[in-house]
Image: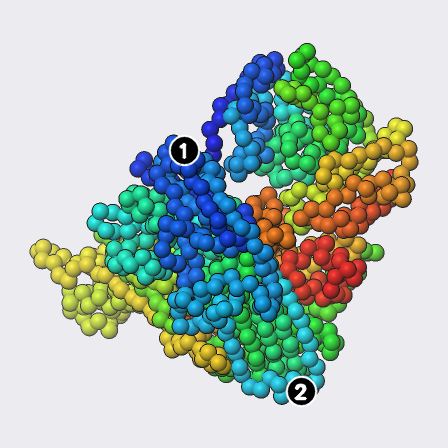
Amino acid sequence: MTNFDYYKPDNKSEAYNLYMDLKNHVHYYAGGTELVTTIRKGKMKVDALIDLKGIEGIKDLKKGELGACVSLNDLEVVQCQMLSDVAFKIADHTVRNAITLGGNVCGRLPYKEMILPLLAMNTEVEIVTAEGLVRSPVESIFDKRFLLKPGEFVYKFYYEQKELKFFYERVVESTTVDYPVMTLLAVKRASDYFVGFSGLSAVPVYETFEALDFDQLTDYFSKFVKGNMRSCDEYRIHLMKDVFRKALEVFND
Amino acid sequence: MKVVGTSILRKESYDKVTGQIEYTNDQSSPQMLHAALKTSPHAYGKIVSIDCSEAEKVKGVRKILTGADIEGNIGLYLCDKPPIAKDYVRHYGETVAAVVADQYEQAVKAAALIKVECEILKPILSPLEALEEGAEVLHKNMANYSHIPPIHPEPNSNVANRTKIRKGDVKEALEKAKEVVDVMVEIPPGDHVAMEPRVSICEIKQSGDVVITSATQAPFVVKGLMSIFFGIEPGKIVVKSPLLGGGFGGKAGIQLEGLAYLLSKSVGGRKVKLRNTRENDLVTSPGHIGLQAKVKLAIDHNNKFTAMDMDYYFNSGAYADYAVNVSRAAAISCTGPYYVPNVRCDTLCVYTNMPFATAYRGFGHIEMAFAIERAIDIMAKKINMDPFQLRVINGVRSGDTTPVQSVLNKSTGDIRTCFEEVNNMLSGNIKDVVKIDDRTVRAKGISGLWKAPAMPTNTDAGAVITFNTDGSVNIHTGIVEIGQGTQTGLVQIASELLSIPKEKVHIEKTVNTRISPSDWATAASRGLMMAGNAVYEACMDAIAQMKSVVSTVLRVPECDLILENERIVINDEPEKGLSIAEVALGYVYPNGNAIYGQIIGKGKYIAKHLTDIDPETGNGHPDLEWTLGAEGVEVELDLITGKYKILKAVCCMDVGKVINPQMARGQIVGGMSMGIGYTTMEGFKFNTRGQVLNDDLRDYKIMRIDDMPNYEVKFLETPQMDGPFGARGLGEQSVIGMPGAISNALSRAIDKEVNKIPMTSEKLWRLMEGLDD
């Protein structure tokens, strides 16, 4: 649709330096499902794309360690139920062959559903920065979105391998292959509960609680509810309460 | 040889699945120029200025057209649409400028740089709003629009067509009725979402030939209208239609062809390709019609329907296109497949500032049936009667009169048995709501359906068959292959009649209006019946010619000759005869003398006895052949969230002779799934400014495979006495009953009347909570 320069560097610093050296509209490119469609519709200006998928290590995949450019379907390999449950409801199988884990949580779309299990599992993230790789808890640099400086990009995730009891539900407007009206992930951890939503609000929202209390949960999350063309505020609140009840049933068992 | 009635593979299957089909957009040449459109972000506005200066500087740009460059309107039945918006934009997505450039990317880039200044006006966003006293008149010049005689526009209003049906005495019947129910239903405009977006390529040759290749269901309509609107001699217009990636009515009539011609003309006749993006296809080109309708149904003490009193306000959007005839077709069949002695119906085709509407599978019947089937279920509930029984006792049969008072003939299908089959497939007890657990219930719903083609009274079809040296045959018709499989059905008819194996019956897949015999359009579910009859006649013509040759050579009377395994043989001495190969291209005697020459079979068909309808009463005979059927669903619904799943969808249709059972089933199931999507999730969403919020496939959701219920399909085969082998149309029909069946099941499940499409879980929840009615 529009002409742009395409780069596929094979190491981290080359990618970073390219980004910093290139002028005008430069973007990192991972799976491309969002970029290609956005560019085609003329909603995004692009002079250069830097494809991250050629970078050494960025597609590494083993238990506890996830390269940012593994596809959502690839996640099956690590056999982590929580990751799989969330990942395999995003888009459809063909599209999941392209969508990357990093792209899902760093893209422009507000849903970023994969951030929920990553946060819940105390994941640490490695970021490529001017000073090289910097590793820190996801929680410390994710607030509505990843807080990255220009040129920085996500390289790898390291999640804690623990068997955690969790409740997951994804509600859509009608057909299953759609953005979520809400995705709830509630997780019982050693000393607290993680409760997070995607879709309920304009950005992912989450909090930890010492115990799960219906009124407290409702009270806390209601303030974030934001309707859109898929459903209105009141119905979302109604659905939210319903998923809370279901979650409480699971944890109270 | 039994070929008719067997499930042979589609002739184009292997080419299709291996990617060898060349669709219109696959055609490309170095000389070809490319077009892109600048469209309106506003639903209604007065165009103040259009600045193309920046766009013109883009490399490769050859020409930019705006409404000011083009004289006159085009329009299928009512000539109301400037090819590019002029003075006003009347819907979101309307074309305001078109760019022609060497490369498509250049055209797109330039289109984005065109600056349009608009004075934004308040849009009209429903038919009832458009009909209010003092409503803005969207087409102020309507009195000067030309139109075909069967439609009746009302200038100085927003009514593009009004069709009236007056049968019996409705007032008296309502007064004497045992019970009367009212219902109001609503359907938003939406889109067909054919897999292949619309595309047209046009070139004007030095000879004056205008050559168009287009994704069109109606190459002959395009040819005819191009001649009328642009003053081109019909013989100079060549329209080619390759295989289509779906049509569903959206590629009938005239679509991009007119603008493609104007663009080609603007660059000296060079070949220009105009193709829709998916977004253009959704909102710039027409989609399906919307509706608001009020229906009153009366019954007597025998639970017989005595009267229907109806007002259908069809939402045509900004332009009339096919919508005027959709509203007319709905009037002609306005009672659904039930005998009703007293009928008053006004169907109006109303302009609004929404994307405009063209033909869509079902053509007015899906909308009409939704209202009728809702009314019947509300009545059944009121009198506490099984909805199945109420339908059975009121179903039409031959000898009954339709709303236009034409008499249903002996070919009329058996709708009562259709209802019984559907009831059985759903295990009866349609009235019962079954509790599965604390929050889950199951419920069933059924509906009837009928449809006759809505088409010109002189609708025709033709077929020519020629032969090859091996005795194999080539069929030429004007039927476009849009995925429906008619071409394969025609092959089966010829194979059976000529006793030639199906592998040796070939059909030309691209329709070319200069070569192919005339054919109105591949629409209205008429292809198999009408072109089938033409192929039938062409085969009989060829057989008669071959018998004549064989009679001469073998010195036997023609009446003693029969066809058998690709040979014409003497009936009581079948070892004596000639092969089709020996006579197909002229018989050659052993000494070299040749006689007769090649066999060319010709066949034709024209609709019989059709008339227009009376403008005041609707009386007439516009309905060629009715296909009747019944459908039903079982749903499982969550009473807390309103979420539901359609578990089972069933259909029994009386289609006459089934030519190809698997393809017929595929066609029925396809229509049912389209109807489920239409009912449960589709339709445009608008903001208060009339902008379409879901104008791409990220947000305009259609059925996915995991939304599919289990399908069960049965056929009845009451012969269509004037159809080929007794077959009648079945292409569109199965979409028609789905809104009724689903809404009836959902209404029972939540014990509220569900009268609005799409039936989202949120809407059901709001009904259950009493937030909406």
Q: Which residue is located at x 67 percent, y 87 percent?
A: B175
Residue type at mark 2: give it.
Glu
Q: Which residue is located at x 18 percent, y 70 percent?
A: B556
Report whether A99 appears left or right of B8. right
The correct choice, above or below, for B308 with respect to B273 in the image is: below
Q: Nearer the viewer, residue B197 or B348?
A: B348
Image quadrant containing the N terminus of chain B: bottom left
What's the colour scheme?
rainbow
The correct choice, above or below, for B432 with respect to B502 in the image is: below
Residue B466 locus on image (x, y percent): 25, 57
The correct choice, above or below, for B143 with respect to B679 in the image is: below
Residue B49 locus on image (x, y percent): 46, 46
Q: CA distance from mark 2 to mark 1?
A: 71 Å
Image quadrant containing the C terminus of chain B: bottom right
Mark 2 or mark 1: which comes first in sequence? 1
Residue type at mark 1: give it.
Val
Q: What residue would you read off at disc 1?
A: B58
Q: Which residue is located at x 61 percent, y 78 percent?
A: B309
Residue B662 locus on image (x, y percent): 49, 57
Q: What residue would you read off at disc 2?
A: B175
Q: Which residue is located at x 62 percent, y 83 percent?
A: B306
Report whether A99 appears left or right of B142. right
Q: Nearer the viewer, residue B603 or B163?
A: B163
Question: In front: mark 2 or mark 1?
Answer: 1
